[in-house]
Image (cartoon, rainbow, N blue to C red):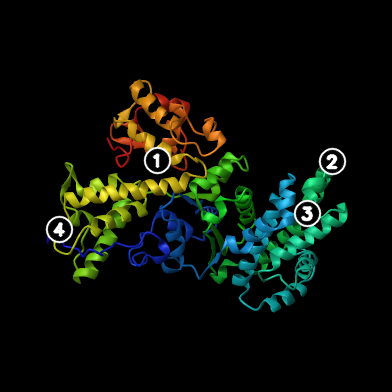
Amino acid sequence: MAAFKFRKNAKIGNLDAETDSFLTPCFYESEIFRGIANFDSSNENPDFTKRVIVGRTGSGKTALLKQILEHANVKVHDTIEAENTVFEHINNNRFVSELVASGIDLRVFYKSLWLHVLLVKVIHQVYRSSYESFFDFISGLRNTSRKPYKPDVVNEYMESYKDNFFNDNIVTEITEKMQHELSGKFSIDGVSLGASAKNENMQKIQRETSSYVSRELIRKQKELIKVIKEEFSDNKQQLRVVISIDDLDKSWLSSSGIRYDFINALLEAFKELLDIESVKVLISIRTDILMGIYHNNLRQDEKDLSLIYAISWNKAEIREILNLRINQLVKDQYRSNHTVTFSDVFNFDVDGVKADEFIINRTMLRPRDAIDFVNLCLAECDGNVELNEEIVLEAEEKYFATRKNALVKEWKSIFPHIKDYLDALSFVNVNEFTVKELDEDIKDTTLNYLLDRPAYSIDDDLHNNRMTNFEELIKVWFTVGVIGFKKSPKVTIYSSFEKHELDITDFNKTFSIHPLFFRA
């Protein structure tokens, strides 16, 4: 095999799917992607209801959604920007904020807002004509025993919001109508609600709020869904529409107290549309955010299993992704028609292990990890020197820093002291250990490091938030993926969506530090 000398700026793609020029020509069609693209609603496709794409940072959630039109039999792929359509308004609305501060449960209201936003997108794609003519279509519907919907209810809903039904002002109008209704009933306004209302009054407001949303919004929206299903969801038309929501892990969400209620409401709303067979609403969500919803007791995880695609990759799949990208890079640089693989280019040893295995073993089996590591290796090239052991080892140090920073950003909302916990792992100087047999000096040194870290708040100073129990620390390490436990001499189990927490019985097992994070 010919030696390859790469230019210093060579890459096998960018880390974000939005700017990755290698994504389309080197896209790897996984089983999950094929499931997403399958609109067969028969019993032969048990995954038809799976619409929530869950994965860790860098697992390829956005890439899956971006390739819907390129690689699937989908006619239309539209998107919803959660921040700009719903969240920004409800998070900044004074009346809503006062209700939340007073303990009023607004989850059903959030669900109704999501339903409207989703319905607008669906109508736009399945009706394929002007909004004005859709109003005419609805007003022309007549009651008949053969139809499963109530035209008068649907018409009433659309007429109520006719001026803004299909534009960005609808969230404001729906909120203001509810505010007017509740303020009139209780002679209150949003400004004074939280300060003056008593418990009894709050219970009345809760009942009236829930009753109003159910009566004026949810009930009517469900009738509109029936119309769409009956009149426009005929699969004989071969209509395939995907509507995706992919910004639920952005920074705007992490600082809001209603973030989990907001996302939970979306997960409730989209289920109402499952019967519209020609439309799939796909929701991309990071694993830690969904875990936060479950930990706040907003929903039961076992009830979501039929809705969730949990993204995971094995070594063979990561290798194939790298094969496709390495081959594309060589083709672009050398104008070669020969197929070149990842192992062809990294055909040397690093620390006594084949370089390709060394690299894959230090990823967390996510595409972004693998791309990042290889790019860092290529960045050490200058067009004259072949890839070698020294280049890979130097790149590994840089890759370790980027991967560690990514973990801190990913888990900080759940574990505020995650950086300290990751740093503390460096004091465990054996790559495999059992809790019972691990040297007590190592445990003490690890915990003393955490005790000596600077405090950021009163709770930190009292160590009410920072973990100072070694077994609890192991739970965190496992959840974020820097340790696993040995299932057999050749099999190590790391955290996954299906098993993201340790069970009490796991503490009798042998733990293994991930090769990237064993720095002794």
Q: Which mark is residue 246?
A: none
Q: Helix or strand or loop: what does disc 1 sit on?
A: loop
**Looking at the image, is mark 3 or mark 2 earlier in the sequence?**
3
At 67% from the left edge and 71% from the top edge, which residue is drawn?
Answer: 166
Q: Are marks 2 and 1 in contact (CB under 8 Å)?
A: no
Q: Which mark is residue 386?
A: 4
Q: CA distance from mark 4 to mark 3?
A: 68 Å
At 63% from the left edge and 60% from the top edge, which residue is drawn?
Answer: 88
Give the amino acid type for the residue marked by disc 3 in the picture: Val
Q: Residues within 10 Å of mark 1 (few under 14, many from 20)?
A: some
Give the amino acid type for the residue marked by disc 4 in the picture: Glu
At 48% from the left edge and 44% from the top edge, which residue is drawn?
Answer: 412
Query: Mark 2 highlights which residue?
Result: 200
Task: Reply above or below: 141 against 431.
Answer: below
**Looking at the image, is mark 4 or mark 2 earlier in the sequence?**
2
Q: 212 and 451: which one is in front?
A: 451
Q: Helix or strand or loop: what does disc 4 sit on?
A: loop
Q: Position of residue 5 (x, y in %)?
A: 16, 62
**Looking at the image, is mark 1 or mark 4 earlier in the sequence?**
4
Query: Mark 1 highlights which residue?
Result: 481
Q: Helix or strand or loop: what does disc 3 sit on?
A: loop
Query: Mark 3 highlights which residue?
Result: 191
**Looking at the image, is mark 2 or mark 1 earlier in the sequence?**
2
